[in-house]
Image (spheres, coloured by chain):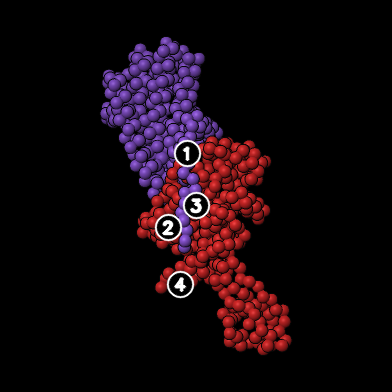
Chain colours: A purple, B red
Amino acid sequence: MSTATIALSNAQVQRSPGHTATIYLKEAKYEFIKNLRLRMYTASVLSFPIMFYVLFGLVLNAHQAIGSTGIPTYLIATYGTFGVMGASLFGTAAGLASDRGLGWLQVKRASPMPPFAYFAAKVVTSMIFSAIIVLALFTLGITMGGVRMPFGDFARLLGTLVAGSLPFSALGLALGYFTGPNSAPATINLIYLPMSFCSGLWVPFMFLPKVVKQIALVLPPYHLSQLALGIVGAASHESNATHWEVLAAFTMICLGVARIGFQRDQEKMYG
Amino acid sequence: MIATMEKSESRAQSSADLVVASLEGVNKNYGNIRALSGVDFRVRAGEVVALLGPNGAGKTTAVKLLLGLMQPNAGRARVFGGDPTNPENRMRTGAMLQVGRVPETLRVREHIDLFSSYYEKPLPLAQILAAAGLEKLSDRKFGDLSGGQKQRVLFALAICGDPDLLFLDEPTVGLDVEARRMLWDEIRLLVSRGKTVLLTTHYLQEADALADRVAVINRGEIIAEGTPATIKAQTAGKRIRCVTSLTLNALRQIPGVTEVLEDREAVELHTGIAEPVVRELLTRDATLSGLEVTSAGLEEAFLALTQDSSKNGSN
């Protein structure tokens, strides 16, 4: 067959920074809208930490304190961590596992979408939902639980918890690459719920059995909640630097695992 | 067993010889299963090429290789003379793939808005909606659409960037007759604007209706290639139906008859060329009536081709 394979055009596609920014923004905007409309997501991710907070922080223990920190304040830090963790894990892993396993990610990969935009959108969306949960807890705590702290502490607490979305988003990406579309939610719960308990997010840390306390030292939610509790004056004794280091290392490991999954996926066929 | 035919009924365009997509000596394995074996396949500018084959023949694999979604084990896939994964090539390519689940809570126009943003010069939303027949559905959430409507959204996403090269993997699966015809018209319109289309299908009628060229694929090998007419001509092409007093045995002895079937009061003869057989029939049976001669459809041709290749394959 006499055929000449000819490049019809060598024009480089060099998007303007403005165009690239638009793509990232739209990707994130629609990821957010998509999850906001997904009742499965909002019902479990938003309502559980808020319901728990109302029940255990406002209805049952409102006038008690742990050390010098009132329960309503203490629980903003722990249920905040719990909420951030759920929003981030479900926001990344569930969507990625489904998109990947059921062919949607291939449609996106076949398009000229910058690949990183897809992941950035999931992480940013998880951070926004994390912020929404923490702000909801603040609002409830201030209006109904008598929570009072300097504005700077609110800002630091919010900033810490939202930044704490990153390790769990990284874990979510890794899980999304190594679970199927149907098994992802169950797998997430299998990690999310026991980790929350062992890290003292449901029952204050000092009331946990000793063996659980030791397990907690290697769990990222423990370290995030300790950073948050440090801001409201209720932390254990490790230094903040240790907590940040554990979280950073955990994030890097998870991103490494996610990267292996990403590369493996280039060669595998789904659907 | 690879019957490759030079085709030349391509459109009268100066660019007609330019290869815009090709698989060159491609092997692709999934574990121990060979999905494609020694596939050589070219799509030239301005053509509609149909990759025709039964389920599991390797059609989707061929498309995914050309989209750079996977890499061949041997040989290479080229698009616009380069690597399919090059961003500049992706910019000029649109793809409609078979998808198990699309995010269901986004509206039709939101999906299109997002995909349009990936391209340099997307078509206007109104034009995309019109081309895909989605004008009245643009505010619907994807999850609320019927199967056929969902297919149309995927088509809209494939064309939104006004690509030069379009890959359509089983584009009309699940469409009703009307929607299928509409999509065919859209594909013809794209080609009239100079676009190149590779579509896969197991609807033979679809390949016949749309394609300049058909490549028949079975068990990972291209077993025939040519215009729809040459594909049909490659197998015993005519059916003769008549009411006759001749016995089945007598009919079988007529030269050129490959098969004789009884069909109620009539008989049906299969043959390569009809005229000598008809002449013979009329000579032998003066009372013969109800004579009908029809071309075997692409369907029969296709079945014959794929059965041949299966037989050879098992030897």
In this view, A263 is above or below A213:
below
Q: Where on the picture, by quarter, is residue A231?
A: top left
Say which chain tag 1 marks. Answer: A
The residue labelled by disc 1 is A13
Label 4 and label 2 in one chain: yes
Going from the N terminus, do you reach mark 4 or mark 2 first? 2
Kindly report which numbered mark, 4 or 2, lies closer to the viewer in this rendering.
2
Say which chain tag 4 marks. Answer: B
The answer to whether one can see residue B173 in this image is no
Label 3 and label 2 in one chain: yes
Gap between marks 4 and 3, in whole Å? 34 Å
Disc 1 residue type (three-letter): Val
Give the residue drawn at x 65%, y 52%. B185
x then y, percent, for residue B288 = 71, 84
Mark 3 residue element: strand
Q: Residues within 10 Å of mark 3 (few under 14, many from 20)?
A: many
